[in-house]
Amino acid sequence: MNFKKKILCIGAGYVGGPTMAMIARKCPDYKVTVVDINPARIAAWNSADIPIYEPGLDEVVQEARGRNLFFSTDVDAGIREADIIFVAVNTPTKTFGEGAGKAADLQYWEKTARQILANSEKGKIIVEKSTLPVRTAEAMERILNTNDKGLHFEVLSNPEFLAEGTAIADLEAPDRVLIGSRETPEGLQARSEVVDIYAHWVPKKSIIESNVWSAELSKLVANAFLAQRVSSINSISALCEKTEADVGEVAYAIGTDSRIGTKFLKASVGFGGSCFQKDILNLVYICQSYGLTAVADYWESVVKLNDWQQQRFVQTILSSMFNTVAGKRIAVLGFAFKADTGDTRESPAISVVRNLVGERAAVVVTDPKALPHAKADLKDLGDTVEFEDDVYKACEGAHAIAILTEWKQYKDLDFARILKSMQSPAFIFDGRNLLDHQALYKMGFNVFAIGKSPLRHF
Ligand code: NAD
Ligand code: UGA
């Protein structure tokens, strides 16, 4: 088949896989190849058991795979044939050297730049899909365009705004697609080629064009603003618990002001996920490096509040269970950082379980999709933590239940049956305000939720 253009994506992770599957679905006239250095991941993308759990993704992959969507480990061949290369490799927080703990670790990113150069026989459009510090495109351009082959590369920024768990819906009908480029004739030409891809299904008014620096920075700022809303409502949850105000009622009352809006105001045990913390810390580091200390401190407080909220949850468990959980069985329901994903990166469940184990609690973890990752995250704790597929078995003999992920199925559990199988007094700590607290209290549970007055029988 003759394809109009050949697109390559380097990095077959949570972003590269779903975004390219959607592009392949919507653009049957383009060949889309996704490459990765991890052979197990590529093998999984080529199998019936794709490597990430994302509602609706299976169907999209099955429709396009083998037609115009291909997964491969041959990065070099992919580069050689591509006209447009998206780079969606991981950009974690640096753990060493200058900027450790805050700055983005760009080693994977830079390696791809050098690999692109080594394997290119013609100039190409390079699209930053990974989330990167503002002005990364400049470094990328330097690496790529300082070549003795006479090749010219245009570096664009097209950050991804999908959220895990709703990735397919987000990709199918995005609020907006952002494409930033240099404002030179070559830059604008490259920009229009990337716009053409999305214009296959995204209305033109939802495709925002900007300069490349605005696009890079907007991605970090979008995540910072979203996370800031969660930390803001979580800070108020603590005040609600002291004052008999109810955080759900407060969120509703303020959210109905259209200037504030209702979304992203759900108080919780804290935000998790691979990006919020990393991207805010990256923003903090960038501000610090420009000498903007007040700005850096402002954004860093969003992350500090999030850490505090997670610690506060464990303190509530401890103080309400008579200041000791040593030897007590605590069933942790949900380990993923949010519902509808198996991803546990930076999940609040990790720190909550670790702190409970530190208090010598006998923790049992259950989750419908995330147990394999949970086991890997807690490997160093050995058999001090139990993992159980069956949620009812996890609760058997427990003194307390902690809800850490808002899986819908937990709402429909037979709590009367669970209560009978538990130790008395039985506690529920609802870190996601998921359950019907009054009903559970009437049944006999002592119920502690985020930002609500405790319901206890003693
Ligand atoms: P991920 O770790 O799931 O995937 C990255 C993949 O890149 C891995 O499979 C890795 O093996 C591969 N890789 C690394 N170096 C490579 C190289 N030199 N050649 C080929 N493959 C290589 O990460 P992710 O969650 O998909 O995130 C990727 C980027 O997208 C990050 O910058 C992240 O901040 C951003 N982002 C993520 C999300 C999300 O929801 N996860 C959303 C928006 C943006
Ligand atoms: C987030 C952004 O929503 C995406 O737009 C962005 O593309 C992505 O980060 C990224 O750059 O990686 P994601 O982390 O997948 O997406 O999931 P979110 O839905 O944003 O949830 C993040 C965390 O905040 C979860 O732990 C969630 O439970 C928590 N949260 C969210 C709350 O505690 N309260 C809320 O009201 C909303």
Image (spheres, rainbow, N blue to C red):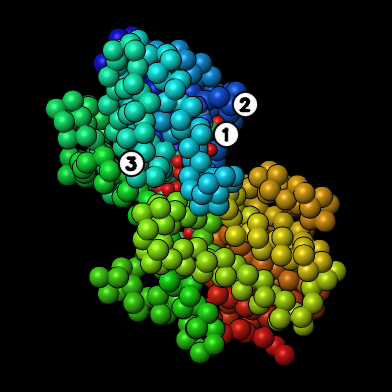
Q: Secondary structure at mark 2?
A: helix
User: Which numbered dot is residue 135?
Assistant: 3
In the image, is residue 290 above or below residue 11?
A: below
| Nearer the observer, 128 or 418 | 128
Cβ atoms at labels 2 and 3 below 8 Å apart: no
Dot 3 lies on which element?
Answer: loop
In the figure, residue 396 lies in which quadrant?
bottom right
For residue 250, side relative to residue 442 (left or right):
left
Q: Residue at x 48, y 45 (%)?
A: 104
**Would you call the spot at circle 3 few (<14 residues within 10 Å), some (14-19), or many (20 or more)?**
some
Quick check: is the Cβ at mark 2 less than 8 Å away from ligand 1?
A: no
Between 3 and 8, the one lying in front of the other is: 8
Kindly identify the residue that appears in the image at 32 percent across and 48 percent down: 217
- Tell me whether the residue at label 1 lies in contact with that at label 2, contact meaning CB atoms closer than 8 angstroms: yes
Q: Secondary structure at mark 1?
A: loop
Type of the residue with mark 3: Arg
Q: CA distance from mark 1 to mark 2?
A: 9 Å
Identified at 67% across, 67% down, the residue is 402
Q: Inspect this view and state whether residue 63 appears.
A: no
Residue 159 position in % (x across, y down): 35, 41
* 432 horizontally vs 126: left or right: right
Left or right for 320, reference 190: right
- Which residue occupies 55% across, 52% down? 101
User: Is the shortest distance between ligand 1 and the CB of mark 3 under 8 Å?
Assistant: no
Where does residue 68 sit, x and y in percent of width and height? 38, 19
The 10 Å Cα crowd at callout 2, few under 14, some 14 to 19, many 20 or more, is few
Q: Position of residue 88 (x, y in %)?
A: 44, 34
Residue corresponding to mark 1: 51
First in sequence: mark 3 vs mark 1 = 1
Residue 100 lies left or right of residue 236; in this view the side is: right
Query: Mark 2 sits on what residue?
Result: 40
Q: Amino acid at mark 2?
A: Ala
